[in-house]
Amino acid sequence: MDHSARVYDDITEMLPNEENPSPLVRLHRLVPQNGSELWAKLEWLNPFGSVKDRAAWEMVRDLEERGELGPGHPGRGLVEPTSGNTGISLAALAAVRGYPMRAVVPSKVPEEKKVLLRVLGADVDVVKDALCPLPGSEDGTIGLAKTYAKAQGHKYAMPNQYENRHNVDAHIRTTGPEIWRQTGGRVSHVFTSLGTCGTVTGLATFLKAKKPSVKVVAVQPSAGHDVPGLRNVSELDVSKLFDPALIDEILEVDFELAYVRARDLARAEGLLAGPSSGLIFEGARRVAERAPVECGVLIFCDNVFKYTSNMLKHLPELAVES
């Protein structure tokens, strides 16, 4: 493949790695003017639109390599509980590979994400559950997906992003090396969020091995939030990938600011970032206000297009008069 010419035989060749990284763009107008450098890593420019492309590809390849998917199991596909982005990435990969896909999503997931899953050909089960899937009854998102995988194992394999170490490995293999190379080893801080915790654990593992002084800051939304894909620490029982020893600071931000800062990033920096990116930016801005940040990298997980209904809910002034 030729990344310089941007010519590919297959969409999977566009997936990010050290030789084909997602872009790093410096922020200017919203950054404290004290010598701080904040850089946004634009994960929505991955082929399926989010940081979850990385984990999805790693988990699918592992299932194929172990013979859980592919010629040994004709007709077998994927089932996964998801608040949207991982499901979209898995559904896109399933389409490319010729696998069926079933996504089990909470009812409060934005309608835009449910539609995208259907556009990609996935069967979508919508169940009453927390915005981000939580462990609990078999009728919940995770419970129902596990029931499908257990009762119809001939039909479905479940990657299980909340427990699958390949979710972490994806960021050790790709995101961490990309950041190290893109910053020339200057990276001093990484700002990300908490969800499955694959991103934060993988980045911290790689970057702290390279440079122990790197500060890893996780930004969490306040309790009762409605920011899809993100979790407060109180909701992390579901994840087997969370390692607090790798995180230097967990900073809580009022979840309403996720939407306000997403708007601000668009208007001041020209970045069409989603609400999780808005929340992460606000956390990074606060850290930079305390003391200059030499070279901070912010993981901007996805763009705003999948959240326009949520943006209108929180910022009704965005509505256009008909």
Image (cartoon, rainbow, N blue to C red):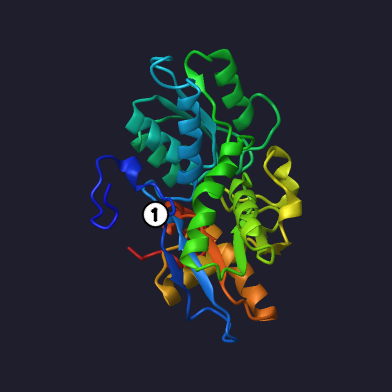
Q: Can residue 70 be seen in this view?
A: yes
Q: Position of residue 258 (x, y in %)?
A: 57, 63
Specify few, some or many for label 1: CA neighbours under 10 Å numbering under 14, 14-19, or 20 or more. few
Q: Where is residue 138 in the image (x, y as percent from the top left)?
A: 66, 24
Q: Which one is nearer the viewer's eye here, 198 or 233?
A: 198
Q: Is residue 84 visible?
A: no
Q: Which residue is drawn at 45% across and 50% down?
A: 50
Q: Is residue 9 left or right of residue 203?
A: left
Amino acid type of the residue tagged 1 in the rendering: Glu
Q: Which one is nearer the viewer's eye here, 259 or 280?
A: 280
**Mark 1 residue element:** loop
| Quarter where residue 95 is shown | top left
- Considering the image in quadrants, where does the C terminus appear? bottom left
Q: Where is residue 156 in the image (x, y as percent from the top left)?
A: 49, 20
**Farthest front residue?**
210
Q: Residue at x 43, y 57 (%)?
A: 303
In the image, residue 236 above or below residue 69 = below
In the image, residue 237 above or below residue 222 = above
Q: Is residue 165 left or right of residue 41?
A: right
Residue bearing the label numbered 1 = 19
In the image, residue 30 above or below residue 40 = below
Q: Which one is nearer the viewer's eye here, 7 or 122?
A: 7
